[in-house]
Image (spheres, coloured by chain):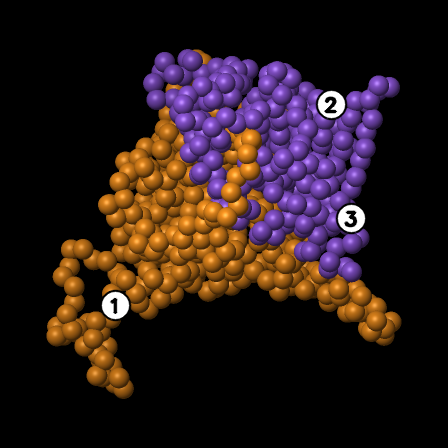
Amino acid sequence: MFTELSSILNATPDRFTQGEFILVSDRQSDASFLIHHFLSFYLRAHYSAISQRLGVSLTQAREKSQLIFLEGLKESLSILIPQTPQQEVKLCTSSEILLLAYRGCMSMSSDGGGEEGVEEWGPPVLLVDDVSVLLSLGVSAGAVLDFSHYCRATVCSQLQGNIVTLVRCHGEEAEDDGSDGGSEWLLKGLAHQCSLTLHVQGLPTGYCRDIHGQVEVCWRRRRGDGQHTQKKLFQYKVHNKGASFFAPGTSSAVL
Amino acid sequence: MAAPVSSVGKPSAERPPFSSTSFQKKTRSKLISIPGTRPSVQNGQLLVSTGVTSLDYLLGGGLAVGTVLLIEEDRFDSYSRMILKYFLAEGVVCRHELFVASAQDNPDDILQELPAPILDDVAIHKPVEQPRLSCEPQDNLDAMKIAWRYQNLPKVQSALASSSRFGHYYDVSKTMEPEIRQAAKCHRFYLPEHPTQSSTTHSRMIESYSALLKSLQEVIHREGFDLSTPMSMSRNILRVGLHSLGSALWNDDLSCHDDPMHSHALTTFLYGLRALLRSSLSVAVVTVPSHLIQDQALMGNITRLCDNAIALESFKGSERETNPLYKDYHGLLHVRQVPHLNCLASQLPDHKDLAFKLKRKQFSIEVCCQRLHLLCATLSRRRSSANLCLLLSAIG
């Protein structure tokens, strides 16, 4: 958990808003370090070795059924290389794959809490690392939007939990995709569904060793008269123990 | 790693104890030593050499086992092919197994062109002959005149000594001796030898890529590179070299059309390749003719699905060939992506202007001092040292 980011977001592991849909996106940069923040934030304590340095044990959390990993990479191999002809016939359209994934997520969230000896955890949190890989696999952006909508309806509204999703884009923002299935389109669609966006980008001036990029944090709050958006811009540097966030121009390398 | 992992974590109601640490020291006894590998100093990953020592340095010490290196080919596929051959030659010298796949040239032809290693102590395996003992006279050698006491000692050192080195040098003017090459086990995949069956169902990948993935999975499983096989067997590394994926010869229209029909075939294949590599003791080098692919977003997706990515841009045939500033180099090298495995920060190289030169005994990658020369030339006219300092710090 990055303490500076937690203070920027006004959230502590004891007190955070529930029912939130957080979108993390990046453009020509790598925002996966933010996923580690949210993972350790929600647990308080790819992911195991880094979380140890952040003070959280993933294996312990897994043993206590606090954390359930759905590794798409491992399961995918049986789908991509069908062993029997029957399996190939079952190989489905993209929406069916997402339906399977959705059902998997929901069954995980409904387990636990009914057996003896299992601790009662709070509302569920769904962390999706890299929804853009689904686009590379041929799933249409519309299907991914449907998937996130259904997850949000179940996790955020019904179970009062939180969702954190990572989307990765490539290229300049002004580029118009034209076609229906680009990651830019998906990013815009998801940005409308979420309540908090963290957009990671490289510096507009180019590569720098001491400042790895900038993060734009955007809150979308619903007030009585409509949407109220608040934006803040920070620069960040990632190191082995965490990440530090500072206002633009106040990096320790410059001051 | 950008694998799609969705995890459901439920925050606990009570505060977890902070005093207990979950740090566990890795016991040395559990690590098996495989020849030709070494652990990384940064994150403890098992590394292999790419065959080019300067490229190893750029990638953070070497190529991590279980990862993919993507090489964006230069225009005539000369230097990318050279790096692929270095990679395979390093595998032969370290006694790893090889898997070579190509649609254009027969893998046997690629294997015959491997550069000769520069080592006087490479063990030449001759399983039919008896090992030479020091008491046997070696009549066919010239008698040593000065160091005659050493004449009867065996010429080759023990195999363990040569494979304990990490990274070797190669002489590109000579090809590897057939005896050394045949000692290594090579698996081949030549696309014209695999007739494509027409599949009636709509498959995500085109047949050539599925056949390749299936063949690779079979080799991994059969030869015991799977991590799930019992640890008692002696382990080895499988080096996978895939030549020119995405070109039209693989029946892929990525490089032919602006709006390809199989736009997800290569990305799906790379995803499956990563799944295979992560669960086995193998490492892959893939070359892609990126100069033919017009869609930058697609190239970005391809890059992100691989762990390491570099791009080569050769000066051959361009106006830079005659540019005196670039006369020392053969081309530019761009590092597109470096992985951060098991750690938060990635080891990006300090300098972004890298150029390479293929010398006879070394493929060297250096910081291109061209911009510095330009600046010095302009500033010497102005004779202002303060400007020089400011501009030098701006380069980084």
Q: Position of residue B225 (x, y in %)?
A: 32, 41
- Up the image or down, A107 lies above or below A255; here it is above
Residue type, label 1: Val
- The hue used for chain B is orange
Q: Which chain is purple?
A: A
Q: Is residue B375 above or below residue A90?
A: below
Along the viewing direction, whichever of A237 and B1 lies nearer the viewer:
A237
Q: Which residue is mark 1?
A: B156
Report the mark closest to the observer, 2 or 1: 2
Residue B315 seen in render: yes
Badge 2 is on which residue? A192
Residue A247 is labelled as 3
Query: How would you rate the neighbour count of disc 2 (Cα within 10 Å): few for under 14, some for 14-19, many for 20 or more?
Result: few
Discs 2 and 1 lie in a common subunit: no
Kindly indicate whether the residues beneath marks 1 and 3 are on one polypeptide chain.
no
Q: Describe the element under mark 1 as helix, strand or loop.
A: loop
> In the figure, is residue A67 to the left or right of B344?
left
Distance between mark 2 and mark 1 Cα atoms? 69 Å
Q: On what subunit does the disc labeled 3 rest? A: A
> Could you say whether the residue bearing mark 3 is in a helix, strand or loop?
loop
- Left or right of B377? Residue A81 is left
Please identify, in this view, whether the residue under mark 1 or under mark 3 is nearer the observer. Answer: 3
First-in-chain label (3 vs 2): 2
Query: What residue occupies the far bottom of the structure in this picture?
Result: B146
Label 1 with label 3: CB-CB less than 8 Å: no
Q: Residues within 10 Å of mark 3 (few under 14, many from 20)?
A: few
Choose mark 3 or mark 2, whichever is in front: 3
* Amino acid type shown at disc 2: His
Where residue A175 appears, x then y in whole percent?
Answer: 75, 32
The quadrant holding residue B153 is bottom left
Mark 1 Cα-neighbour bin, 10 Å: few <14, some 14–19, many ≥20: some
